[in-house]
Amino acid sequence: MLRALDIAGMVCPNNVFLAPMAGYTNYPFRKMCEELGAGLTFTEMVSAKGLHYGNEETKMLLYHGEPTQPLAAEGTPPLASPLRGSTRAAGDRVSENPSVTRSIDVILRSVATEGSPERGAESNPSVAFGDSSPTGAPRGSSSAGQPSPLAAQIFGSDPDIMREACESEALAPFDLIDINMGCPMPKIVRNGDGSALMEDFPLAEKVISACVKSGKRISVKFRIGVDENHKCAAEFARLCEGAGACMVTVHGRTRDKIYAGPVDYDEIAAAKAAVGIPVIANGGIWNSKDVRKMFDRTGADGVMIARAALYRPTVFCSVREEEEPPILPLFLRQLEETKELYGERFAVVFMRKMGAFYARGRHGAAAFKRKFFTAETSEEVAALFQELWEEG
Ligand SMILES: Cc1cc2nc3c(=O)[nH]c(=O)nc-3n(C[C@H](O)[C@H](O)[C@H](O)COP(=O)(O)O)c2cc1C
């Protein structure tokens, strides 16, 4: 079940991964999850066209820890909004598009209603961060102290532009490039990207082959199909492998279900049985029990966690049966690092959202959220979160 995983020579310290999440898996969040024990983390999806047009915002999504200067001059947040601007690229005006905003609302509604994350570990305000991570691991390393492999995710459907993205300087530092073939957002799908590629097998194959020609390790994340009547996980996994992908991730829901509803374990198992490359199973994992169930029912080589990590990034400790460090110091450090990197305004908006996730299930969370969302400065965000934790 839990083990190190070799993906075409790239060794991940374990096989429980953090999923790409647009608007959330920025560098400070990925680094925290890595230090808490995620075996591999992914950037949020990045537009290949955005890289083609040299869009600075797109490049910023690929920040991976070096150099250390802030990405935003104070007062000029690079990303207009943590969610709505995150996939924006030249020629790709995602954030202005109401259908994308609606899709994101759907995502967040399902985030709010689904699953039952266990309450996080009690905080221990006396635990303070020095230079080391909450788990004692050096910065930028996994909890096992190994240098962590880097993975980025891109989206697009033009084979040449996708290959060019894989060959770009911006993606050069990444050990693995994942192609998004599962995104259900209408704006993305209407452009022929994301899960639209599951409706055009020949084009999907061309896109993967073109990316493989770049010489990079290429993986594909997709869904079990577009709807109940068109499930094709095994067939699509075979297509990916045939085109040269070195790993696939299967989200066990159809596109029309967005992020809601039960996961089809049998479809993931069929994909696993169909190919020889590592298969990562994704969907509906909230705790260790779900991880075990996913491995047992699918035989997958690894699992990928998305929303549970937003509520409780320490899920990466608990699934490995390690003690979960307290949330308060994690939150304060994430706030500080987000501010350093992206600027005060972005940090306030983003960390209000994260704080609301982390507060779920705590005594007084509803009243806290009302107050918390009025916080205007990072000092206020820190103080209110601290208050909740110390009172709760
Ligand atoms: C807010 C949010 C943003 C997401 N962004 C991406 C993305 O950029 N790329 C991607 O492949 N999947 C994305 N997903 C899907 C997740 O990676 C994952 O497949 C899905 O949430 C199911 O996993 P879960 O049940 O553990 O949440 C996103 C999901 C959420 C909730």
Image (cartoon, helix red, strand yellow):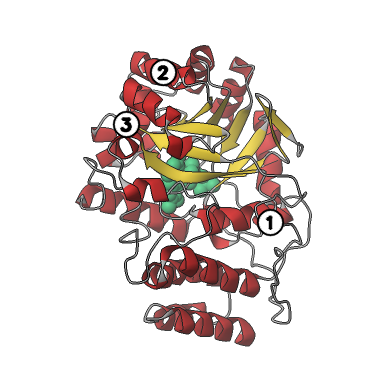
Foreground of the two, 156 or 315: 156
Mark 2 residue's CB less than 8 Å from ligand 1: no
Q: Is residue 206 visible?
A: yes
Mark 3 residue's CB less than 8 Å from ligand 1: no
Categorize mark 1 by other alpha carbons within 10 Å: few (<14), some (14-19), many (20+).
many
Q: Which mark is residue 318?
A: none
Q: Nearer the viewer, mark 1 or mark 2?
A: 2
Name the residue beneath numbered marker 1. 36
x and y percentages locating residue 199 in the rendered image:
33, 22
Residues under numbered marks 3 and 1 in contact, where contact means CB atoms less than 8 Å apart: no
**Residue at 62% in and 68% down:** 330
x and y percentages locating residue 228 in the rendered image:
40, 29
Q: Amino acid at mark 3?
A: Asp
Name the residue beneath numbered marker 3. 193
Q: Amino acid at mark 2?
A: Ala
Q: Amino acid at mark 1?
A: Leu
